[in-house]
Image: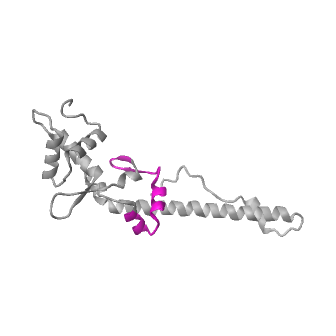
């Protein structure tokens, strides 16, 4: 649902509506001014309504694409592009980008920006053509590091090898980059 609690109710003041509908010849300039501004106000109100409807359509499409994320958690974030959503909603990619900018969605895993759900695809190492999102790979990495109980800390190469066993093929330097983005220290300082 769209959170419209903070959005004021928009409308045209009844006084001006009446003024525009009366055909008094006393002040034609005032009548023309009122009519023109009422039309602009109505156009603005329709634009805000259409923008909210587009936001709702885009959010719904994201939820459909990311169904596994919403059911199972951040590890299941699927790769998704602006183009995928734009084609689904029948709008231009720039519209999806503008609408999703600075908008947030409340989920079981916290309040997240809509942009969070757009992620590059990382090819899986299995032959079934599976792919993972960058966010999903980070969550898998985090899980591997947190669940590891060995005496020796996991190196970036070892994490890369463990990811490969789980079907995610990324280089050691990519593991290092993602580890830094997750604010996880290197094996030497952990």
The residue at 22%/34% (across/down) is 186
Say which of 8 and 61 sits in front: 61
> Is residue 17 among the parts visible in the rendering?
no
Figure check: 82 above or below 184: below
The residue at 80%/65% (across/down) is 32
Say which of 161 and 137 sits in front: 161
Looking at the image, how many numbered discs can be counted on the residues? Answer: 0
Say which of 49 and 121 sits in front: 121
The residue at 46%/65% (across/down) is 92
**For residue 10, what is the image quadrant?**
bottom right
Q: Is residue 81 rendered to the left or right of residue 144?
A: right
Query: How far across and down, in percent of the image, does residue 149 sit?
Result: 12, 36
Figure check: 133 above or below 172: below
**For residue 190, what is the image quadrant?**
top left
Query: How far across and down, in percent of the image, does residue 41 sit?
Result: 67, 60
Seen as rendered, the residue at the extreme right is: 26
* Residue 99 within the segment the image draws in magenta: yes
Query: How far across and down, in percent of the image, does residue 99 sit?
Result: 48, 57
Query: How far across and down, in percent of the image, does residue 69 sit?
Result: 29, 55
* Residue 102 within the segment the image draws in magenta: yes
Seen as rendered, the residue at the extreme top is: 189
Q: Which residues are magenta?
A: 83-111
């Amino acid at each position: 649902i769209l959170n419209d609690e903070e959005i004021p109710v928009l409308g045209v003041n009844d006084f001006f509506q009446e003024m525009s509908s009366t055909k008094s010849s006393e002040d034609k300039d005032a009548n023309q001014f009122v009519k023109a501004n009422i039309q602009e106000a109505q156009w603005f109100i329709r634009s805000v309504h259409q923008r909210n409807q587009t936001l709702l359509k885009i959010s719904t499409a994201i939820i459909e694409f990311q169904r596994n994320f919403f059911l199972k958690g951040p590890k299941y974030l699927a790769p998704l592009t602006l183009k995928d959503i734009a084609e689904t909603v029948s709008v231009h990619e720039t519209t999806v980008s503008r609408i999703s900018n600075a908008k947030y969605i409340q989920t079981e895993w916290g309040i997240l920006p809509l942009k969070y759900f757009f992620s590059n695809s990382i090819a899986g190492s299995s032959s079934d053509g599976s792919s993972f999102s960058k966010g999903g790979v980070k969550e898998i990495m985090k899980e591997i590091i947190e669940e590891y109980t060995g005496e020796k800390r996991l190196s970036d190469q070892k994490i890369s090898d463990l990811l490969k066993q789980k079907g995610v093929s990324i280089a050691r330097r990519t593991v290092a980059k993602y580890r830094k983005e997750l604010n996880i220290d290197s094996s030497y300082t952990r």
